[in-house]
Amino acid sequence: MKQSIIHIALLVNDYDEAIEFYVEKLNFTVIEDSQLSDLKRWVLIQPPGSSGCCLLLAKAVDESQKSVIGNQSGGRVFLFLGTNDFNRDYAMMVANGVVFVRDPVDEIYGKVAVFKDLYGNLWDLIQQNKG
């Protein structure tokens, strides 16, 4: 048996503002942006050089969904952005105005810093140690 996670839904207030953040601030690529109905789009984004899992930007449609935008994981780091060059990507993100809430540190598993996306979701930027 072979399975894989192909998409992770991320609740957003607005498709276009979310796309702008991820493309302009994090250098992500829009993989697909299709209109499904008057109110719903199928928007997939992915980090540069990635060929695996995509984020599916899902516009919140009711108060229950809107209430957890930016806090889908209860305040814990929610998503992990791997990189092959931490210093390059950290510098680019800082220059693009990304807010880091924890400064870079060297851990036993690699170099990591925590940043917030436009809604406040916490992400790790991480370069894992080889081996």
Image (spheres, helix red, strand yellow):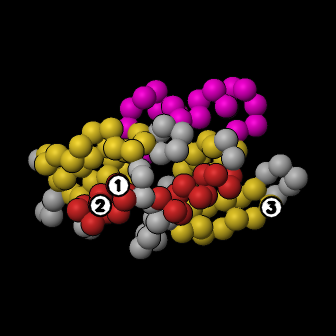
Tell me: residue 95, above or below residue 99: below
> How far apart are labels 3 and 1 at the CA level?
33 Å
Q: Compare marks 2 and 3 and give the one earlier in the sequence.
A: 3
User: Going 47% across and 45% down the picture, which residue do you hit?
Assistant: 117
Element assignment for label 3: strand
User: Closest to the observer: 116 or 63?
Assistant: 116
Element assignment for label 1: helix
Q: Around disc 1, counting alpha carbons within 10 Å, would you say few (fewer than 14), some (14 to 19), or many (20 or more)? A: some
Q: Position of residue 31 (x, y in %)?
A: 60, 69
**Number of marks drawn:** 3
Contact check, label 2 and label 3, Cβ < 8 Å:
no
User: Going 80% across and 61% down the picture, which residue do you hit?
Assistant: 35
> How far apart are labels 2 and 3 at the CA level?
35 Å
Left or right relative to 82: residue 121: right
Tell me if residue 98 is in the magenta stretch. Answer: no
Tell me: residue 122, above or below residue 15: above
User: Going 53% across and 35% down the picture, which residue do you hit?
Assistant: 70
The answer to whether residue 53 shows anywhere in this view is no
Quadrant of the frame with the C terminus: bottom left
Q: Position of residue 125 (x, y in %)?
A: 32, 52
Frontmost of labels 2 and 3 is 2
User: Going 59% across and 34% down the picture, which residue do you hit?
Assistant: 69
* Residue identifier under label 1: 94
Amino acid bearing label 1: Val
Element assignment for label 2: helix
Extent of the magenta region: 60-79
* Residue identifier under label 3: 35
Contact check, label 1 and label 2, Cβ < 8 Å:
yes
Q: Around disc 2, counting alpha carbons within 10 Å, would you say few (fewer than 14), some (14 to 19), or many (20 or more)? A: few
Q: Compare marks 3 and 1 and give the one earlier in the sequence.
A: 3
* Residue identifier under label 2: 91
